[in-house]
Image (cartoon, grey):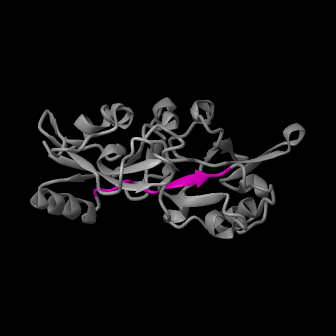
């Protein structure tokens, strides 16, 4: 188990405890250790408690976000105290750093900000051209769904779910993940066009071609053309909460 140090990294709002930048406590085994003469905000602590025991352990699950999460925010929206969680043992830090460098990291995903989308369909156009050489939006692996009565334009594209419902729903194992990008790929020779994957997708991001085969975003091999073409950055490729 890792021993942890939880440090106040930033106070973005007004903390009336008050907590100050540099204040900290340690988690050693099953104990919380607070420096003499110091204290810890119980409201912030209660929000972190479920996270800390999990953070103490090494988790061998590529889709788990806990090993790679280093910052938490207190639950008071007016306080906005940012806490940084780090391991105490320098050797452990180096081991974790080495593991991450060797590829044990959270894979990038397609991220969508529906509020920014203007419905220009440039993403559809470039996707269709890159994959088929045509400018037919129906061939695009990303689709813009328009809700006219609400004035909304919603990009529908595969989000690379960790436990992908589409893959689980396929009765013939025609869908599988690329080992590097985690994009969902289609083995058309196995696919029978039952459309169970389409029904299982929580994002409505699967549609079918003229020959009744599923059209799913393949991330362009790890460099999505639609992301580079989007003029308003409604599409990004990376990790939520991080600058890409």
- Residue 197 at x, y = what percent? 57, 34
Q: Position of residue 122 (x, y in %)?
A: 76, 64
Residue in front for this viewpoint, 208 or 153: 153
Residue 67 placed where, x, y %?
A: 29, 48
Between 50 and 8, the one nearer to me in the picture: 8
| Count of numbered marks | 0
Which region is colored magenta?
A: 104-113
Residue at (23% x, 44% y) in the render: 38
Q: Is residue 149 left or right of residue 99?
A: right
Query: Which residue lies at the image location 72% right of the left edge and 55% below the top edge?
Result: 116
Of residues 180 and 10, the one nearer the viewer is 10
Q: Main secondary structure of the magenta part?
A: loop
189 on left or right of 211 = left
The stretch drawn in magenta includes residue 122:
no
List the single residue furthest toward the front: 37
The quarter of the displayed image where residue 63 is located: top left
Among all residues in the image, which is located at the extreme right? 149
Task: Tell me the residue at 14%/33% (across/down).
Answer: 30
Image quarter (top left, top right, bottom left or bottom right) of the N terminus = top left
Image coordinates for residue 109, horizontal then vertical, percent: 50, 54
**Residue visible at 50% across and 41% down?**
190
**101 or 130, which lies in front?**
101
Q: Residue 94 falls in which quadrant of the image?
A: bottom left
């Amino acid at each position: 188990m890792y021993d942890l140090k939880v440090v106040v990294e930033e106070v973005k709002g007004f903390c009336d405890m008050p907590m100050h930048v540099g204040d900290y406590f340690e988690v050693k085994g099953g104990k919380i250790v607070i420096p003499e003469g110091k204290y810890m905000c119980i409201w912030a602590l209660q929000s972190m408690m479920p996270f800390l025991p999990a953070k103490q352990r090494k988790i061998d699950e590529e889709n788990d976000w806990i090993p790679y999460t280093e910052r938490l925010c207190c639950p008071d929206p007016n306080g906005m105290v940012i806490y940084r969680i780090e391991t105490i043992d320098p050797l452990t830090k180096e081991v974790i750093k080495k593991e991450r460098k060797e590829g044990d990291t959270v894979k990038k995903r397609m991220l969508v900000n529906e509020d920014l989308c203007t419905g220009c369909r440039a993403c559809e156009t470039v996707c269709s051209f890159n994959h088929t050489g045509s400018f037919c939006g129906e061939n695009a692996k990303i689709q813009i769904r328009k809700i006219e009565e609400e004035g909304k334009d919603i990009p529908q594209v595969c989000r690379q779910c960790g436990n992908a419902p589409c893959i689980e729903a396929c009765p013939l194992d025609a869908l599988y993940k690329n080992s590097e990008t985690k994009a969902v790929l289609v083995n058309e020779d196995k696919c029978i066009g039952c459309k169970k994957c389409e029904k299982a997708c929580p994002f409505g991001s699967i549609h079918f071609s003229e020959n009744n085969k599923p059209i799913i975003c393949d991330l362009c091999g790890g460099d999505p053309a639609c992301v580079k073409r989007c003029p308003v950055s409604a599409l990004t490729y990376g990790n939520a909460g991080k600058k890409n």
